[in-house]
Image (spheres, rainbow, N blue to C red):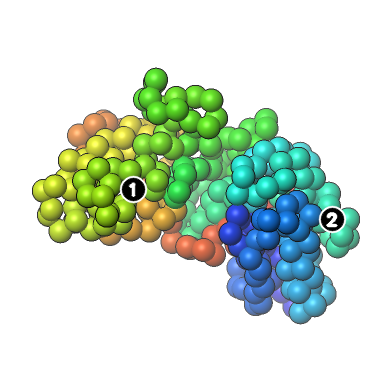
Amino acid sequence: MKESYIGLDLGGTGIKAALVDEDGTITARAKRMTPTAEGREGIFRAVQQVIAELLEQNSQVRGIGIGTAGWVEPDTGKVLFANNNLPGWTGMPLREAVAQAFSLPVAVENDANAAALGEGWLGAALPYRHYAMLTLGTGVGGAVVLGGRIITGGKGAAGEFGHMVLHPGGIPCSCGQRGCMEHYVSGRALGRLAAEVHPAWDGRHLLEAFAAGDTAAAPAVERYFTDLSLAAHNIQSFLDPEAIILGGGVADSHPLWLEAWKLRLAELTPLKLTLIPASLGNEAGILGAARAIMQKERG
């Protein structure tokens, strides 16, 4: 009988989890809306309910892996910081609390780290041992994988590419800096550029218009391409990954813009970059969380 693990992906909107076999096959699923209005206690109660639902279907689970929004302390699995999308979650001793509740081994990772592990196990990063993941969603996140293992840093914040300064003295950021990458290459940033072109447009409209040859859209998208090129150059120059995996909502629209961006990138950097869209979609976090506990249990 194949060993089974629980992989759980916790975000500000929903909690998704699954029973995952050692070969990556998902055999059962459970989900809940994240009850953010109920704060830490309500969120943790929902996490427990999802795990318990899966354990009812397989009592022989070997361990539980969790990917959560926020910075996670590597040694303890404690959430060091989470923004207002998960109210009260900062300081949550998540690994300890789940282990006590279910008497099972537990691994906790930042959600972007979990997604990167999933892509390396069964997704777009499968051919690579050393890679970076750049997530272009509402904000910007990322992860660094070396030799198949996540690099967490001393406080669990390695790979937070969104807070690398791209434009010194630029747009103020909630982290206290100015000009952070997040304000120039995120989905929110793309939406801001779109609204400058047409008040009714969002980022998707802008990219669709660009792909259709709309000359009004081109300057805004070229600005976005320039900033994204600088971001990718900096990641490649510093980390020398075999590939950069592109995830998040903006990356999901890559058929509209990826090849055009690569042309702009080649003009701005002499470095040779391998850029690959993520392939697992919403499954990446669940599978990566399961992979994290597998790695922990197998050493």
Q: Position of residue 236 (x, y in %)?
A: 40, 34
CB atoms of marks 1 and 2 within 8 Å: no
Q: How many dots with numbers?
A: 2
Give the answer, above or below, for where 78 lies relative to 58. Answer: above
**Residue type for callout 2:** Ala
Label placed on residue 191: 1
State the CA–CA distance, disc 1 to disc 2. Answer: 41 Å
State which mark lies toward you, 1 or 2.
1
* 79 vs 20, nearest the viewer: 79
Q: Position of residue 6 (x, y in %)?
A: 71, 65
* 160 vs 279, nearest the viewer: 160
Give the answer, above or below, for where 9 lies relative to 57. Answer: above
**Residue at the (65%, 74%) spot, across then down:** 29
Q: Is residue 6 left or right of residue 157?
A: right
User: Residue 27, located in which quarter of the rendered image?
Assistant: bottom right
Q: Position of residue 71 (x, y in %)?
A: 65, 40
**Residue type for callout 1:** Gly
In which quadrant is the N terminus drawn?
Answer: bottom right
Give the answer, above or below, for where 264 lies relative to 247. Answer: above
**Does the image show residue 124?**
yes
State the residue lying farthest toward the top: 169
User: Residue 270, located in which quarter of the rendered image?
Assistant: top left
